[in-house]
Image (cartoon, rainbow, N blue to C red):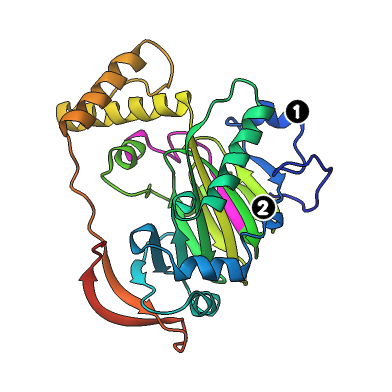
């Protein structure tokens, strides 16, 4: 069943427009949909985003194109080249691409202030919630493109600013999120990919997200995204808590034990006596470089070209080297 409705229910002066007590009980445990006021900052208009693109560091953006089948991953890496932000947005609007501007708060302090306000507000509304390692990214994506089935490591929120998209959010049970696959993501063997089957859609929560709406879902919740027939502009925010850190440490240690000793741990719970030992093992691995995974090397094979049908032009394949 598709969920979600538009409109603000009441005004409370914060970034979130319709917070209710029930959302505090649901936060982190269930998917929650809220309305927001990010548009009112003036930082997410097309002109503001074009200006951002004009000055964005190469090492902090990703430009990708993909296939149309959710079951088959086709993913290419590209570059903006010397095109202006206005031309980039135009090419994306008429093409099949995702542009991900990572670490917004490090590039422009104004976005950092918005990010700080968001989490200050959530912590005020949820006594006992202590978040850290906040991050914000901006997504500009073409009509009808998709993000493949995947999971994220930190806590996630998705804020829609322009266009419409459909988000499928799946249970965190073993069938949909195999423990070994989650470990692979956390220790860095893969980026975010986990196995997907079309039948999983029968168990998904489905949300049609419109401008002014946002979603927050349970930690590591598998999900995928389909854009409607329009340009999409969205913001992602990430955060960590003590519980998220514990979950990361336990799954990281479980991944090490499985791969180095062939031992499949019985529990990946983020609480209990086992957390201390597994956190210590994770810290040891991080400090010594033991179990270091070979870093994935991306290759570029296209560039933005507003004059082409899909907004891109093929170029000779080359490694993506920052700096």
User: Is 104 situated above or below 303?
Assistant: above
Is residue 202 among the parts visible in the rendering?
no
Q: CA distance from mark 1 to mark 2?
A: 22 Å
- In the rendered image, residue 320, in percent from the top left (x then y), is placed at 25, 65
The residue where tag 1 is placed is 21
As for residue 315 lying within the magenta part, the answer is no
Which quadrant holds residue 245?
top left
Q: Which residues are magenta?
A: 166-181
As for residue 167 lying within the magenta part, the answer is yes
- In the rendered image, residue 158, in percent from the top left (x then y), is placed at 58, 49
Viewport quadrant of the C terminus = bottom left
Say which mark, if any, is on residue 38. 2
**Earlier residue among tags 1 and 2:** 1
- In the rendered image, residue 124, in percent from the top left (x then y), is placed at 66, 28
Q: Nearer the viewer, mark 1 or mark 2?
A: 2
Q: From this viewpoint, which residue is outermost toward the bottom? A: 307
């Amino acid at each position: 069943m598709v969920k979600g409705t538009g409109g603000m229910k009441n005004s409370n002066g914060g970034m979130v427009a319709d917070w209710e007590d029930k959302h505090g009980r649901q936060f982190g445990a269930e998917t929650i949909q809220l309305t927001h006021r990010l548009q009112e900052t003036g930082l997410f208009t097309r002109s503001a985003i074009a200006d951002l693109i004009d000055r964005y560091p190469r090492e902090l953006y990703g430009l990708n194109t993909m296939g149309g089948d959710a079951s088959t991953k086709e993913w290419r890496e590209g570059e903006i080249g010397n095109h202006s932000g206005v031309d980039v947005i135009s090419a994306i609007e008429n093409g099949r691409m995702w542009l991900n501007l990572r670490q917004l708060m490090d590039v422009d302090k104004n976005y950092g202030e918005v990010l700080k306000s968001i989490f200050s507000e959530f912590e005020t509304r949820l006594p006992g919630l202590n978040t850290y390692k906040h991050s914000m990214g901006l997504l500009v994506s073409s009509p009808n493109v998709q993000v493949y089935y995947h999971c994220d490591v930190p806590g996630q929120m998705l804020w829609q600013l322009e266009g419409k998209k459909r988000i499928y959010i799946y249970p965190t049970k073993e069938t949909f999120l195999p423990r070994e696959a989650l470990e692979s993501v956390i220790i860095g063997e893969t980026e975010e990919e986990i196995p997907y089957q079309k039948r999983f859609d029968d168990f998904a929560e489905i949300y049609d997200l419109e401008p002014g709406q946002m979603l927050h879902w349970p930690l590591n919740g598998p999900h995928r995204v389909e854009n409607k027939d329009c340009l999409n502009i969205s913001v992602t925010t990430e955060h960590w808590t003590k519980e998220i850190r514990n979950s990361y440490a336990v799954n990281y240690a479980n991944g090490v034990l499985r791969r180095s000793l062939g031992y499949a741990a019985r529990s990946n719970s983020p609480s209990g006596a086992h957390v201390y030992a597994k956190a210590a093992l994770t810290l040891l691995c991080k400090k010594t470089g033991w179990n270091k995974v070979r870093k994935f090397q991306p290759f570029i094979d296209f560039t933005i070209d507003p004059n082409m049908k899909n907004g891109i032009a093929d170029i000779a394949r080359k490694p993506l080297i920052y700096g």
